Image: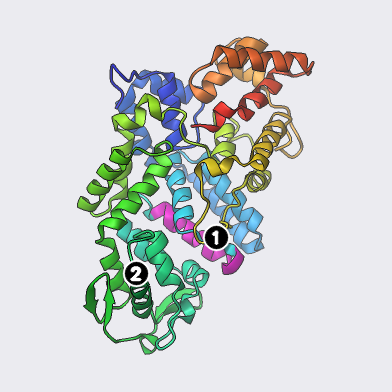
Amino acid sequence: MPSPELPWNLERVVHLHRRTGFSASWPELQRDLQAGPKAAIDRILNDVRSTNTPERTTVTETLLNAATRSDSPARLKAWWLYQMLTSPDPLTERLTLMWHNHFATSNRKVNDLTLMSEQNELFRQRGRGRFGDLLCAVVKHPALLVWLDADSNNKGRPNENLARELMELFTLGVGNYTEDDVKDVARALTGWGVTRDHFVNRSSRHDEGVKRVLNVSGSFGGDDVLQILLQQPATAQRLAWRIGQIFLGEPAPAAAIQQLADGLRFRQLDIDWAVDKVVRSETFFSASQLHSRVLGPVEFVVGAMRSLELDKSGVNTLMLADWTTRIGQDLFYPPNVGGWKEGRSWLASSMIVARSNFAAALIAGALWNPAREIRLTELCRQHGQSADLENGTAWLAQLFWGHAEPSIIVEVARTAHEAKSTTPLSLATALLLSHAVHYQA
């Protein structure tokens, strides 16, 4: 938690929101700055979960039903982006995105938007509880079973895809199991399949023989294997790494990850406990953590919209989905079973160019249909700020980053002025969003 040595200031309020969600508006930042760290963290972790409105629920359900009926992947991506833009609980959406990468399942092979949306909802509904409950639900869901060829895993000719990824990606991690473990876990999983879009356990296809998994022997079935894997210290270690990847900088401090892994194991892999532990820690708010983690494409796009209060502006989320794909994150289509690499891998030159192009499209109003002007001058004045070029640029930098480095403000304002744009503050905004500082949350 912040302390006299780690003062609660605007930079740390911005840090809290950028790490746990998708950035925040100026009124939200000011509210939390005044409320103090405990109240701000309590609200993000707990208080906002029950603030969803019936009207928003109706809209999201309508969008989801339309997407699945249309069989249009683009509309399903647009639905999820609408969720992220408008959710009163951005932390849960941030964790839903994390689990999408952990259990990376692609519609490229599943080819069923209803199954993909059901898996997405599993992440949202169970992603903050005990990991065992989430794991059991996800590995028995048809989306993952189809993705990893579980239906062809039968007695006498086991398919090892699900067994291998279950250990390598979902629980233990590389180096914590043997090829013999893979073979016997595959045997234990024989019989698991899909019928009419539902999980089935066909006893006639199950190998009833004795298996040996991680030095334990028995006539194991799939549920037995899941329990064995959940009890391994390596599973807690991998979950701690995954949570650290999202909430801590690069590289995440090894001592903090180990402490988190020890606590997770003791608390039955309670994800909510782990998130709470990280976000309330001194490590989370330490100077070395500020601006030390690269924003992913979805965080970048949604964060810009939420901080500029454009989340409820009627923005075309189909266009936003297209932009996240161009920047490198095609929702519901991760590149492979390992998901997106995240971190500095997001900063390939083509992705940086795409981010700058997105910023230009945003301030040009091209994300609305029809195109509309982004009224940044009004936003400045609405919050009691000067809208002249230099002062407006400095305020926007505070809104995005929590601080305004004078040399950057001068550089950005001069560039916007020399471009002789009719809307220099909009151009300055695009330059701030394209600045290397902005990519680091």
Magenta span of residues: 108-125
| Crowding at mark 1 (Cα within 10 Å: few <14, some 14-19, many 20+) | few
- Would you name the residue on which mark 2 appears? 178
Tell me: residue 71, above or below residue 428: below
Q: For this view, does 73 lie left or right of residue 215?
A: right
Q: For this view, does 251 lie left or right of residue 61?
A: left
Mark 2 falls on what kind of element? loop
Residue 59 in percent (x, y) is at 56, 48
Q: For this view, does 123 lie left or right of residue 107?
A: left
Q: Residue 226's quadrant in the figure?
A: bottom left
| Residue 124 belongs to magenta span | yes
- Would you name the residue on which mark 1 appears? 336
Residue plotted at (34% across, 60% down): 172
Tell me: residue 121, above or below residue 412: below
Q: What is the C-alpha distance between the residues marked 2 and 1?
A: 22 Å
Residue plotted at (58% across, 57% down): 335
Residue plotted at (31% across, 60% down): 132
First in sequence, mark 2 or 1: give its number: 2
* Kind of residue indicated by mark 1: Asn
